[in-house]
Structure formats: C-alpha cells, structure tokens
Amino acid sequence: TFPNTGHGALFESECADSIVTSFLREPSSAPDSSCLATQRPPTFLTPANTLFAPGLSRAALGEPVGLIELGVAGGGLSVMMSGFALWPAAWLYRKLSHRPVKRPLPWARRIGLVNSLAATALVGGLIAAAIGMSSGNSALLLFGLPAEWRPLLVLGPVVLVLAGAGCVVAVRAWRLGAWSVLGRLYFTLHCLAAVAIGAVLIRWDLLSALFS
C-alpha cells in the first residue's frame, strides 16, 4: 500500500509511478520499491489543523447554489468597494461647490469605509487561500480551510457588527433627512451589501468554523 493515497495510487504518487516504471522496464525482476521507506504517513483532518466549513464546498464544487452565493458575495463586495471612490468624490464636490451638508451623522461614512476594508481583506484572503489550495491540488477546500487561516476569519464578525451599526445609521439618516436622497440610498445599499456578505459567510459555515 502507498501512504497518503487512496485507491488507484498510479498517477497520484511519484513512488507508485516509479515502481510501475521499474516493473515495465524489467518485468522479470522485482521492481525497485525502496521509495516506500521515504513515504510519510497519511495526514488526517482534525480540528487542530482544519477549520471545518462544509458549506464552503458548494462554491468549491461549482454547485448552482454555491455559484449564486459567490455572485452575491462578489456583487456585495463591488458595492462596498465603490465607497472608496464615491464618498471621497462626494466630499470633494461639496467642498468645491461650497454646498452645506444637511444634518450629517458623525462617523457614518467612516463606519462604511472601515467595513469596506474589512470585507475586502476577508474576501481577498479567502480567494488567495482557495487559489493556493487549488494550485496545490488539495482536496481540503471541500472540507474547510487550514487552521492557520483562523486570524483571517476574525474579520467575519467585524463585517457583521459594522454592517449592523451601518444599518442603524442608515435608519437614522432617513428619519433625520441627513444628506441627499441619493446619499441615503447609496448608504443603505452599502449596508445591505455588507449584510449580504455576512449572510454568505454564515451559509459557508465560516463563522462557526472560527469558534469551533
């Protein structure tokens, strides 16, 4: 048997390939199997080395529901990242046109920008992890993430908390008539995008993986 391989070790293990090649070259002699002594024992997935997130497999396998979730997360992130350009542009426009701001809410847009940074770092990190595991032909993505990625998942609760705070600010903005109507609509859309990303994280079991 070949450690770290399942059924059909041929083409999955360099050691198995070398033994088969040795046999084909000299079928009348025992093949060289010395490489078996250098094989490592199998690596088991445990909570010590794996953040189990079975919901993530839907996206990894390209299932229709998983692709929809990917689309929701991607669309939400696009909306949130647009704040990096739109809010500074709006601030500059008001400064240059000397237009007064109607009853601004302190820290509102800063909450949105910080949440955009957190969501961008989280989704970008997940993409980097997925690409790294896929390039290494790792099946771990079907079960979750390596345990060393746990610090990245801390950003998940941060996104959700800031999304909740942003939604509270959005409700107050509508009640107070703060900013322009377009400003209130965009801020509300920004908060809903953050909520959508948080919902996808929950469906992918990434939050439960963080605390498991």
Image (tube, rainbow, N blue to C red):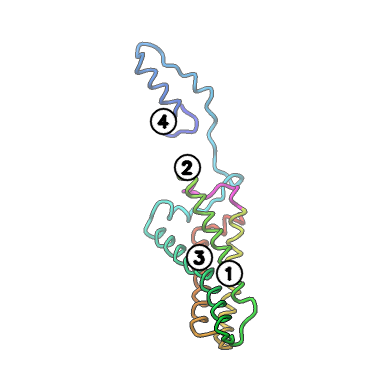
Tell me which amino acid carries mark 3: Ile
Circle nearer the viewer, 1 or 3:
1
Q: Which mark is residue 138?
A: 2
Circle nearer the viewer, 4 or 3:
3
| 145 is within the stretch colored magenta | yes
The residue that label 1 is drawn on is: 113
Q: Secondary structure at mark 3?
A: helix
Residue bounds of the magenta highlight: 136-150
Q: Secondary structure at mark 1?
A: helix
Circle nearer the viewer, 2 or 4:
2
Residue occupying image coordinates x 53% and y 49%: 145
The reply to whether the C-beta atoms of the residues labelled 2 and 4 are less than 8 Å apart is: no
Crowd band around label 2 with a 10 angstrom C-alpha radius: few (<14), some (14–19), many (20+): few
In the rendered image, the vertical position of residue 114 relative to residue 7, given as above or below: below
> Residue 38 placed where, x, y %?
53, 24
The CA span between labels 1 and 3 is 15 Å
> Residue 92 placed where, x, y %?
56, 77
In the rendered image, the vertical position of residue 51 relative to residue 118, given as above or below: above
| 117 is within the stretch colored magenta | no
Residue occupying image coordinates x 40% and y 59%: 67
Q: Earlier in the sequence, mark 1 or mark 3?
A: 1
The CA span between labels 2 and 4 is 16 Å
In the rendered image, the vertical position of residue 99 relative to residue 158, given as above or below: below
The reply to whether the C-beta atoms of the residues labelled 1 and 3 are less than 8 Å apart is: no
Q: Which mark is residue 34?
A: none
The residue that label 3 is drawn on is: 197
Residue occupying image coordinates x 45% and y 52%: 57
The residue that label 4 is drawn on is: 9
